């Protein structure tokens, strides 16, 4: 029996943070940019489809609203909490 992967926050090559679900279905890549917090959201939809969204947030308020509107809040609550925590951290360290 395979062990389930735990949600993790890692450092990708670009120096940002990566938060992903234990099953690898959803992943968020966060990094600071000159314009604000850059977020890339990747969701695997079965074996043949992948949805990638990218956006930049200038404020913690707009980032929090975006996070709270995402269905990941209900499907992966631990990922949601880690996403918000790490996103706020990146926004504060800009």
Image (tube, rainbow, N blue to C red):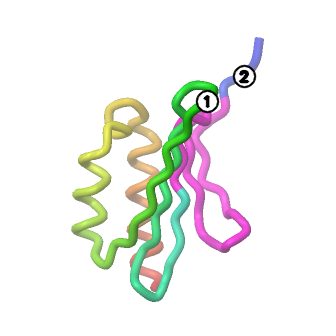
Confirm or deny contact between disc 1 and disc 2 (CB under 8 A).
no
Which span is picked out in magenta? 5-28
Residue drawn 51% across and 53% down? 28
Q: Say which element carries label 1.
A: loop
Q: Which residue is mark 2?
A: 3
Distance, label 1 to label 2, CA atoms, is 24 Å
- Label at residue 48: 1
The relative height of residue 90 versus residue 6 in the rendered view (above or below) is below
Position of 63 with respect to 41 (left or right) is left
Residue 86, percent from left and from top: 47, 62
The furthest residue to the bottom: 34
Closer to the N terminus: mark 1 or mark 2?
2
Relative image position of residue 25 (x, y in whole percent) = 55, 34
Instruction: Determine the secondary structure under disc 2.
Output: loop
The quadrant where residue 35 appears: bottom left
Residue at the (50%, 78%) spot, across then down: 32
Q: Nearer the viewer, residue 64 or 35?
A: 35
- As displayed, is residue 83 above or below residue 2? below
Q: Dot 2, crowdedness within 10 Å: few (<14), some or many (≥20)?
A: few
Q: Is residue 3 magenta?
A: no
**Residue 1: percent from the left, percent from the top?**
77, 11
| Image position, residue 73 (x, y; %) | 33, 39
Q: Which residue is at 31% across, 78% downward?
A: 58
Q: Which numbered circle lies on residue 73? A: none
Q: Is residue 71 left or right of residue 24?
A: left
Q: Is residue 89 above or below residue 26?
A: below
Disc 1 crowd rating (10 Å Cα; few below 14, some 14-19, many 20+) is few
């Amino acid at each position: 029996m395979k062990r389930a992967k735990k949600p993790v926050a890692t450092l990708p090559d670009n120096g940002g943070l990566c938060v992903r679900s234990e099953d690898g279905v959803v992943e968020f890549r966060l990094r600071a940019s000159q314009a604000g917090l850059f977020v890339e959201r990747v969701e695997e939809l079965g074996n043949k489809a992948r949805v990638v969204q990218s956006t930049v947030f200038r404020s913690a308020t707009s980032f929090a609203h975006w996070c709270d509107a995402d269905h990941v809040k209900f499907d992966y609550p631990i990922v949601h909490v880690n996403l918000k925590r790490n996103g706020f951290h990146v926004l504060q360290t800009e």
